[in-house]
Amino acid sequence: MTGQDEKRGDPFAQALFVASSLARDLRDASGAASRPFCFSELVGSLLRPEDAGADAVLRHAFDDPELAAPAEALLRRIAIAEFPAAAAASGGGLESREQAGFRLRLAPSLAADGPTYLLIERLRPEAELPHLLVAVPPGARPEYAVLPRSETLPLQLVFDSGAPFLRAFRDPDSRLYLT
């Protein structure tokens, strides 16, 4: 006996199991799609969302309720910053989140019924530059935003005030990931 909790097992073995299960699920679910997606394509899409075909892979993984949970498990493993659900004492919609050297902040437009800006700020200069922001609301489809390539932060994204991504961002029970 190694003294490890045998219920948890080896973290690498668990990750390998999740990866192989996700690859199988992607193959099974993509039977109706024009071509199957493989696990490496999902990983590549999460790490390089601006690449050709990445959007289709991400939409497929997040649109299928059976694939969304394994895709989130993968997100959790490769994220450079994870923003967990807010504390239970949090009331109402969130306007900012801060975690792992990053701050995400919403700023409304000064124009009536104008857009809402999402600012992504790096609080520690050594933190990696992000490429993708994914919001995972409870019981709903994950929403994502491909970030513009930049050597510096802050980044600024513009959303219509009623965008599903903003609803997911403001929901205290949503989890967010930067990759």
Image: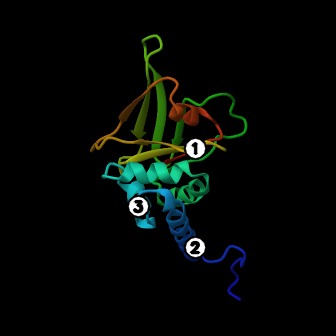
Instruction: Work out whether mark 3 precedes mark 2 in sequence or the reverse, and give the earlier one.
Output: 2
Q: For numbered disc 2, what is the local secondary structure? A: helix
Q: Residue at x 70, y 83 (%)?
A: 3
Which label is found at residue 141?
Answer: 1
Counting from the top left corner in percent of width and height, residue 117 is at 43, 27
- Count of number-bearing discs: 3
> To which quarter of the image does residue 25 belong?
bottom right
The alpha-carbon separation of the residues under discs 3 and 2 comes to: 24 Å
| Residue in the foreground of this view, choosing between 124 and 96 | 96
Q: Residue at x 31, y 52 (%)?
A: 51
Instruction: Work out whether mark 2 precedes mark 1 in sequence or the reverse, and give the earlier one.
Output: 2
**29 vs 90: above or below:** below
> To which quarter of the image does residue 153 belong?
top left
| Residue in the foreground of this view, choosing between 36 and 80 | 36
Which label is found at residue 17?
Answer: 2
Kindly identify the amino acid type of the residue bearing the numbered disc 2: Phe
The alpha-carbon separation of the residues under discs 3 and 1 comes to: 22 Å
- In this view, the residue farthest toward the left is 151
Q: For numbered disc 1, what is the local secondary structure? A: loop
Residue holding disc 3: 35
Between disc 3 and disc 1, the foreground one is 3
Counting from the top left corner in percent of width and height, residue 150 is at 28, 42
**164 vs 161: above or below:** below
